[in-house]
Image (tube, rainbow, N blue to C red):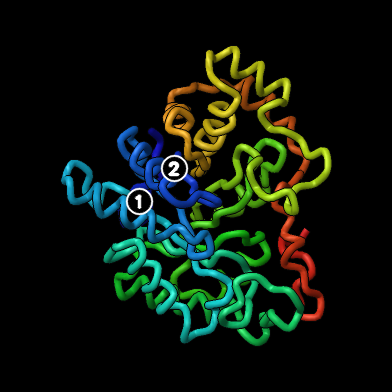
Amino acid sequence: MKTLKFENNDTMHAIGLGTWKAKGNELKKAIKSALNTGVRHIDTAAIYGNEEEIGEVLAEVFKEGTIKREDVFITSKLWNDAHRESHVIPALQDSLKKLQLDYLDLYLIHWPVAFKPGVSFPSTPSDYLSLEEVPIEETWKQLEIAKENGFTRHIGVSNFSKEKLKDLLEKAKHKPEMNQVEMHPLLQQNELVSFCKQENIFLTAYSPLGSGDRSNEMKAEDEPSLMEIDSIREIAKKHDATPAQVLINWHANRGTAVIPKSTTPSHIESNFRAAKVELDKEDMETIASLDKNYRFITGKFFEAPEKGYVNIYDE
């Protein structure tokens, strides 16, 4: 398994388990199955509403003693309604309580968007706080304090463009160590990848398989299926692999992490075994030609021009 190594020598498996949209007993079984398979990188977030279930399974597994807390890299994220200075660390502590952990391995600002406290999802522009009212650097400073106090070992962001990262880097005491964004062969984000590499910021890809199980409201008409792309299927056949394994391995090959979501034990195992696929130069060149800057997660649901949120990704 390829790993990403942080400056303090902590390591994170390049292939982890995403848990967006996963809940209940199905998720609990999936987490246990993943850990037994060898997965050591689990990604969640406050807004997913599943930290308690994950915490119950982790407590049970750690109590058994075969897998220790320090063996598993656990990421969670700050939701948009807790960006105010006084709300950040309490939100992180709430996640720790639900996850039954003393510390997180990585804590991220989920979106460069702020809501009023208590607003899970905005219904009117008045539900937002502008970035003049709550600057990102104000929120970030609290993440830095959280890291200094040992609540999390690493800090980062999610859904940040190159422009937003550059702005944050100018103001940060501790630079972001991770940026989690949508990435797959139809959205390769080469400029962002190059910039993050130059700044020693790691990248984690979400929705690497196209997030086909998200709600219909979030889907476009006739959106493409990553696993039905002819060249991906041909590469999979060439390596006696599945299209999903090719899509997952492609990220590890680029030096980024990837968090495919599944609650099916056989799929979790297959996704984890994607690490063994050996894509060659020809495969990588073929996949490179597929880039269309196509987003499954458009960010349109957070556009509020009245509050300054017009183009979340600065494109």
Front in this rendered view, residue 81 or 27: 27
Front in this rendered view, residue 64 or 225: 64
Q: Could you tell whether 286 is left or right of 208 in the image?
A: right
Q: CA distance from mark 2 to mark 1?
A: 9 Å
* Residue 157 on image: x %, y %: 53, 63
Report the quarter where the C terminus lies. Answer: bottom right
Q: How many residues crowd around disc 2 within 10 Å: few (fewer than 14), some, or many (20 or more)?
A: many
Q: Is there CB contact under 8 Å for labels 2 and 1? A: yes
User: Residue flagged by tag 1: what amino acid is it?
Assistant: Phe
> Which residue does the image show at 44% across and 75% down from the upper left?
91
Residue 203 visible, this orientation:
no
User: Residue flagged by tag 2: what amino acid is it?
Assistant: Gly
Q: For the residue labelled by badge 1, is the local secondary structure a helix, a strand or a loop?
A: strand
In the drawing, what numbered circle is on residue 294?
Answer: none
Q: Could you tell whether 230 is left or right of 142 in the image?
A: right
Q: Could you tell whether 73 is left or right of 306 in the image?
A: left
In the drawing, what numbered circle is on residue 73?
Answer: 1
Tell how many labels.
2
Q: How many residues crowd around disc 1 within 10 Å: few (fewer than 14), some, or many (20 or more)?
A: some
Residue 247 vertical placement versus 135 (above, below): above
> Which residue does the image show at 81% across and 80% down from the upper left?
306
* Residue 188 on image: x %, y %: 67, 42
Q: For the residue labelled by badge 2, is the local secondary structure a helix, a strand or a loop?
A: loop
* Residue 203 on image: x %, y %: 53, 50
* Residue under label 2: 16
Report the quarter where the N terminus lies. Answer: top left
